[in-house]
Amino acid sequence: MRSNAFFSRTARRGLAAGALSLGLLGSACAAGIQVTDAWIRWLPANLPAGGYAKVTNDTDKEIKLVGASSPKYGMVMLHQTVNKNGMSNMVHVDAIAIAPHKSMAFTPGDYHIMLMQPKPGIEPGQKVPVTLKFSDGQTVTAEFEVRKPTASGPGDMKGMDMDHMHGMRH
């Protein structure tokens, strides 16, 4: 009996490790909600950072994102950049509705996740867990890639930390 339990535990660990290496667990999803292209524009000197991602609602009903949290930041809020009379201001948002079978892109200059009070040690190249909270009680935790201040999107090579890749031009 003990060997079966050991084998079962060992098999589960092996399958999980294999799935991680294939990237199968890297895409965050829960009951029809997917989070992809998740990244953070890191700023030095403990300044607040912006979190960006694509949230897809594959359900048949509207979902409402009502909050976020991260163990790496003391305060996390939903924000939107609003342009009024030629001035850009960030405003707190209580909820963001995502229609059935639609996606919402959190991008610089629009809706974003404001990450404040960073814990020590966050730097470009790392991944930070961020949990998105929805009005129906669901949560989705995604790994957000920390990028340099010059980053402008998930495919932006300028935001990647490639200092460890000797001999490559960047």
Image: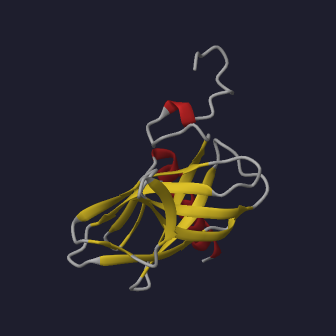
**Image quadrant occupied by the N terminus:** bottom right
- When asked about the image quadrant of residue 150, the answer is top right
**Relative depth, front residue between 55 and 113:** 113
Q: Is residue 14 left or right of residue 167?
A: left
Q: Is residue 149 left or right of residue 109?
A: right
- Residue at the image position 64 percent from the left and 13 percent from the top: 167
Task: Give the answer, above or below, for where 101 lies relative to 2.
Answer: above
Q: Position of residue 126 (x, y in %)?
A: 65, 47
**Relative depth, front residue between 115 and 82:** 82
User: Does residue 48 show up?
Assistant: yes
Task: Give the answer, above or below, for where 62 lies relative to 73.
Answer: below
- When asked about the image quadrant of residue 153, the answer is top left
Q: Is residue 170 left or right of residue 139?
A: right
- Residue at the image position 41 percent from the left and 77 percent from the top: 95
Task: Give the answer, above or below, for where 21 lies relative to 76.
Answer: above
**Image quadrant occupied by the C terminus:** top right
- Residue at the image position 65 percent from the left and 58 percent from the top: 48
Q: Position of residue 101 (x, y in %)?
A: 21, 66
Q: How is the image coloured?
A: secondary structure
- Residue at the image position 65 percent from the left and 71 percent from the top: 75
**Relative depth, front residue between 161 and 105:** 105
Q: Position of residue 49 (x, y in %)?
A: 62, 55
Q: Residue furthest front?
A: 85
Q: Position of residue 56 (x, y in %)?
A: 32, 63
Q: What is the tally of numbered marks visible in this picture?
A: 0
User: Does residue 72 show up?
Assistant: no
